[in-house]
Amino acid sequence: MAFLFDLKALVDMMSIGTLLAYSLVATCVLILRYQPTYEGPKYSPEKAALAAAERESAVSESRINMIEENRFHLQALMNPSSLPTEQTANIVNFLVGLLACLICGLSVLITYGIHFIAKLEPWSIGLLALLVVSFVVTVLLIQRQPQNQQKVAFMVPLLPFLPSFSILVNIYLMVQLSGETWIRFSIWMALGFIIYFSYGIRHSAEGRHSNGDDDSCSENSGLQEKNPIEEVDEPENTNERDQFLSHERTSEC
């Protein structure tokens, strides 16, 4: 590749791809750490009896909780629950998207408006202060949300400050690259999306797995549809056998 292409252009393409990958990893760390944990209930007779007894009362309570969780209001943002829920996860998703937009604006301003900032232009200073304050407030709001308590082998420390700083540095370095690099990168990304959406989705292993599950479900449903007929036929066959056996025994007697 270095023999065929210009070395600087090749290094810039590698740099922008690597920085984008690191930014996506840091973003996913922020999103996944604040997701609620879903664990399947373990079966036991006592728990089953309790669940059956409390199911009716829990239905109305779950409906009320679902309505409350879907509301995005200031109280849930400032005083969230102690454990992560769907509501807190949605809040973090929104804040992470807002954080990415603020970082992009801040990086562009620092890169292309540094001369205006050096001259102490009022609009540049005001915009810089607004972006910095919004960035800090967004990070603090993310920090107030409850994190997932599930322990894994390695967990990123200083959340959400370290991933947010990583996204800031990576996007700032990406903005420093030339416009030609961004054009090449956009063309390659467009080709990648065309290949992915035209071929990758329809030929993915996950798609084949889901189709296989559908086929197995349809086969199981067909078997289930045949079972009642067999169950209906079996009593008739048993009655005929009983009549034949009883007739045989009477004749022998």
Image (cartoon, rainbow, N blue to C red):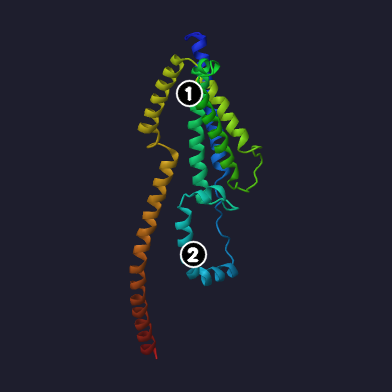
Q: Is residue 143 visible?
A: yes
Residue 118, x across and y down, in percent:
55, 16
Which residue was labeled with disc 1? Answer: 123
Location of residue 83 with respect to 105 vertically, above or below: below
* Front in this rendered view, residue 80 or 151: 80
Look at the numbered disc 2 and give the secondary structure of its residue: helix
- Density class for disc 1 (Cα within 10 Å; few <14, some 14-19, many ≥20) is few
Is any atom of residue 106 visible in this view?
no
Q: CA distance from mark 2 to mark 1?
A: 52 Å
N-terminal of the pair, mark 2 or mark 1, is 2
Query: Where residue 238 appears, x then y in whole percent?
Result: 37, 77
Labelled disc at residue 160: none
On the image, the x and y values in percent for residue 176 come to 52, 18
Disc 2 and disc 1 in contact, CB within 8 angstroms: no
Residue under label 2 = 61
Nearest the viewer among 226 and 215 is 215
Q: Residues within 10 Å of mark 2 (few under 14, many from 20)?
A: few
Residue that sits furthest to the bottom in the current view? 253
Which is more foreground, mark 2 or mark 1? Answer: 1
Q: What residue lies at 39% left-to-right and 57% top-to-bottom?
A: 220
Please state which of residues 41 and 76 is positioned toward the viewer in this rendering.
76
Specify the amino acid type for callout 1: Trp
